[in-house]
Amino acid sequence: MYKERTSRLDGAMVWTRTARAGDGSPPCPVLPDGCMDLLWIGGRLLVAGPDTRAYAPEGIAGLYCAGVRFAPGTAPALLGVPAHELRDRRVELADLWSPAEVRRLTARLAVAQDPTAALEAVALRRAAAAGPPDPLLRAVVDALEAGRTVAATADSVGLGARQLHRRSLDAFGYGPKTLARVLRLQRALTLVRAGVPFADAALAAGCADQAHLARETRELAGLTLGAYAALVPGEALAKSETPQPSGSRTTA
């Protein structure tokens, strides 16, 4: 069962998912969305980096899963690591922050009456220390969401193409072209979940036609459009999974 709500942290969402053990149903895939998540999974603090392809969660059956999903471009300043270092990865939070600090936070969440609210409080404290998000990054996301080309987006924020690519790697984990594809796919799939016919959803989201959307769904989500439409709404959006080997730098 998956639930989400708007966070007190601007632009973020707080979600929970209980993966039932023994029902034989595989977890729904995690789809690229341009976001990064702070996770509380089975008593462990983890970080989900930005995805460029569908991710199949493993080892979460019967576990309580919760997360704070940060708006695109906002997590690196809070976590203290460039997004591209975590691209397509799940890592222990202790690989990014002081292990002693993570042990204290883990102990606090383990006894919290509402661990999800406690996890959100961790994100809020980090956000307060990091300061306000870079408005340029929000402008990049807004431009790409509106369907602008990468060149037009670079012009609108006053950056050259190379500068925009470099800033995008640090903030989003990949270049602006990939971010545009991910955001477009999410727009289309939101319409599909709402029952909009595939062809209409494709055009409204900015795809050339239904075949274009079908290709993007297969490449980025690893699913056919029909298979995606059969998923429980919202299930494909939660990042609860087992971490991959790390190697990211540790920050205080």
Image (cartoon, rainbow, N blue to C red):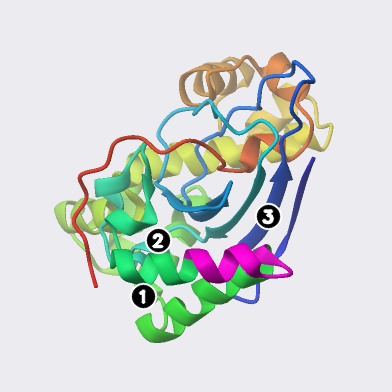
Q: Marks 3 and 1, how far apart in space?
A: 25 Å
Which image quadrant: the N terminus? top right
Q: Mark 1 points at which residue?
A: 134
Q: Name the residue under label 2.
A: 73
Residue 71: % across, % down: 51, 61
Front position among marks 3 and 2: 3
The picture quadrant where one finds residue 180 is top left
**163 with respect to 120 (left or right):** left
- Is 58 placed above or below 7 here? above
Q: Marks 1 and 2, how far apart in space?
A: 8 Å
Q: Mark 3 points at which residue?
A: 15
Residue 46's tag is none
Label 3 SS: strand
Among numbered discs 1 and 2, the one appearing first in the sequence: 2
- Is 88 placed above or below 198 here? below
Q: Which of 90 and 77 is in front in this view?
A: 90
Residue 19: % across, % down: 71, 35
Q: What residue type is labelled 3?
A: Trp
Among numbered discs 3 and 2, the one appearing first in the sequence: 3
The picture quadrant where one finds residue 204 is top right
- The magenta region covers 106-115
Residue 109 falls within the magenta-colored stretch: yes
Q: Is the magenta region chiefly helix, strand or loop?
A: helix
**66 with respect to 160 (left or right):** right
Question: How many numbered discs sit on the rendered protein?
Answer: 3
Q: Which amino acid does label 2 sit on?
A: Gly
Which residue is drawn at the image coordinates 54% and 20% (left, top)?
Answer: 212
Q: Marks 3 and 2, how far apart in space?
A: 19 Å
Residue 140: % across, % down: 39, 61
Label 1 SS: loop
